[in-house]
Amino acid sequence: MNHRTRILALAALLALAASCGQPQKPSTVGTTPEVERRVEQLLSQMTLAEKVGQMNQVSAGGPVSNYADALRAGQIGSILNEVDPGRINEYQRICVEESRLGIPLLVGRDVIHGFHTVFPIPLGLAATFDPALVEEGARVASVEATAQGIRWTFSPMLDIARDPRWGRIAEGSGEDTWLDARMGEAMVRGYQGAQWDATSMAACVKHFVGYGAAEGGRDYNSTFLTERQLRNVYLPPFEAAVRAGAMTLMTSFNDNDGVPSTGNRFVVKDVLRGEWGFDGLVVTDWDSMGEMIAHGFGADRKEVARQAIDAGVDMDMMTYGYISHLEELVRSGAVKQSAIDDAVRNILRVKIMLGLFENPYVDVEAAAPLQYAPAHLEAARRTAEESAVLLKNDGVLPLSADKVRTILVTGPMADAPHDQLGTWAFDGQKEHTVTPLQALRERFPGRVVYVPGLKYTREHKDRFDEVVAVARRADVVLAFLGEEAILSGEAHSLADLNLMGSQSELLAALRSAGKPVVATVMAGRPLTIERDLPNCGALLYAFHPGTMGGPALVNLIFGDATPSGKTPVTFLRTVGQVPLYYNHNMTGRPYNGETLLADIEPEAGQTSLGNTSYYLDYGAYPLFPFGYGLSYTSFAYSGIALDKGEYPVDGTVKVSFTLSNTGSRDGTEVAQLYVRDLVGSVTRPVRELKGFRRISLRAGESRTVEMELPVAELAFWGLDGVKKVEPGEFQLWVAGDSASGEPVSFIVR
């Protein structure tokens, strides 16, 4: 050991000893003293340029040689968008064997709802109300992706979205804070695994924070959320994911109240780092640091780089602001050296915990058999079955395979493998995707007649003579409608949420044939389908269902599986109702069913007497409420009772009820627990989801079910800016959706 190395090693040991002598907050990512020792040892050997290099993330593309010199010089800490295991190995080889310190790359990818085996879009995952199944899907994604060298996914997205015009509603869990938190926890556990090994993929919770409230539902737009709204509605899912051990977090594109998230010291440094103690890696979204210039928050890349590091952002994705300006900013004193060191600690910690130093390479030949493994396809099929929501059924479903001899399959989504995968499915391959048409032909050879009617969802046609003529000769019509994958997701917001093109006209024409019509809608958002419901006998809603969507939908249509999905977001009657969500605050004049526009006398005078909060033309209610979904059987709730009438703030509410399957088929119900705080220091929502359970019952079976609600779950940020449970009277419902059931009351002392 030479003199310089000996001095650096001693300095690292002294720094570690000093840190060990101070009270330590619990680690949110589960680091250990040994990991911290290795972090400090590496940090002590790094030059300022090498530290800044670790904070630089670039998108791979083209020959490896394009990046080789920068990798050797330690100027790149992470790459994204490379999926070829051979090239990833070469990137790693250069870093590990040819750079001065041998620090491996962290390779990232948008693995959002599956890697090669694609599961339903996250909005569909939320419709399952089944965190265990969602966790299994994330584990499948991690196994497939890590086999090819990807060790970091930019998922889950935990933005609360209450505006279906926003294209990225597809990428999250919908409108409810509690459901979003449970789904986020499940995905974090699935991606990262029960223990750190070669199949662990670091989760990145995004977008921090409030992005789902983009004004007008337009992507990248401003938000105007108060601190109380942030704390009560938008921040809790992120905190839950952090507590679940999420290793990384991404800042969002939006500015909130004039402050872009990537430069928002309050949310990143004060809340995330300070209050929650997050010691993981914070990365910008793609060029979101640079976009602060477009926001008018900074004059140039140098200024926004200073703002981002000051806010507590560790890594720059594709702005090149850190790599270009941080060294200069440190030398001028505008940025403290300690800020750089803290950021690099967070980056190195993730790399060490993922085992990248010990195992930077992957076995290229071993990766292929893991893609589309039979167990993975089976999990994808089960998830697609659970995610589909039955919104209407006039007794048409399930179909009897023995009674239908000729099946007309029509509609632009019947055989659209790429679009069936949905948004953010970069690595799903359409040749491995099983469409409804493929599944039906395989199951009913010679009995399926396919007439598309429309080639794509936006096509306009005046007549449907051919498909109607075939419909008259068929026993049943299966119409697959919706929107292509490209119509939802990032930068794909819509102002009109009706079925596009002539799809509604196609459905109306099919009804005129006089045969049973089953409509299946595959989409990335809740569309406004009220006008389409009269033209079908049954309607299944399948948020883009992924690789195995075809077999799953066929199983549901023919009764091999029974629908159990529930709406994770309110379905509107018309886009003009935006925003309309179930857990709104009570107004001073709640709707009581007043006169609608059609009933108003032409010469009626203006008055405020008796008026309430509603639309003259559409009333106050949605088409379908949050948590709604039919089954092929029916369920009844009875005997709902609490174990006591009063509880202390540190107590637990225990509710029991009898759930009965009152129909003739086996089925699964999602029992949902809601509460309302009747009086608070600030107005409280009319209902809030606080629990759910999937319960499977045989036909005619009844079961007594018990659920628990810790009183601590009733806490909120009140008028005094403190999170606590406020004593008072509460109501509690257990029901099959957010608009059903009768409440029972209890008091918190």
Image (spheres, grey):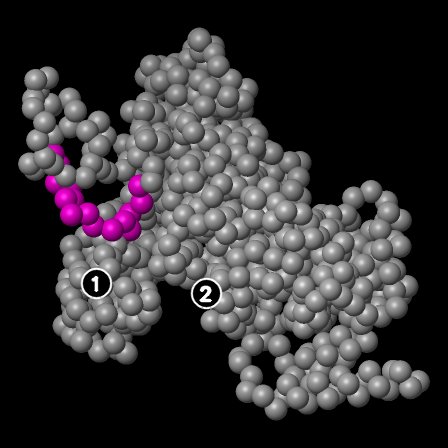
Q: Seen in the image, is 566 located left or right of residue 461?
A: left
Q: Nearer the viewer, residue 278 or 337?
A: 337
Secondary structure of the residue carrying tag 2 is: helix
**Quadrant into which the C terminus falls:** bottom left
Q: Is residue 119 visible?
A: no
On screen, residue 117 versus residue 259, left or right, reads right
**Residue 52 at x, y = what percent?**
75, 62
Q: Position of residue 192 (x, y in %)?
A: 60, 65
Pick the front one: 537 or 75: 75
Q: Distance of mark 1 from mark 2, alpha carbons? A: 24 Å
Q: Which mark is residue 121?
A: none
Q: Residues within 10 Å of mark 2 (few under 14, many from 20)?
A: some
In this rendering, would 630 be left or right of 5?
left
What residue type is disc 2 on? Ala
Q: Position of residue 73 (x, y in %)?
A: 86, 61
Q: Earlier in the sequence, mark 1 or mark 2?
A: 2
Q: Residue at x 67, y 44 (%)?
A: 427
In the rendered structure, which amino acid carries the disc numbered 1? Gly
Outermost residue on the front side: it is 332
Question: Which residue position holds label 2?
Answer: 240
The residue at 66%/88% (across/down) is 18
In percent of the image, x 15 and y 47: which residue is there?
588
**Which residues are drawn in magenta?**
580-594
Position of the N terminus, as image quadrant, is bottom right
Badge 1: few (under 14), some or many (20 or more) residues near its Cα, within 10 Å? some
- Say which residue label 1 marks: 680
Provide the major secondary structure of the magenta segment: loop
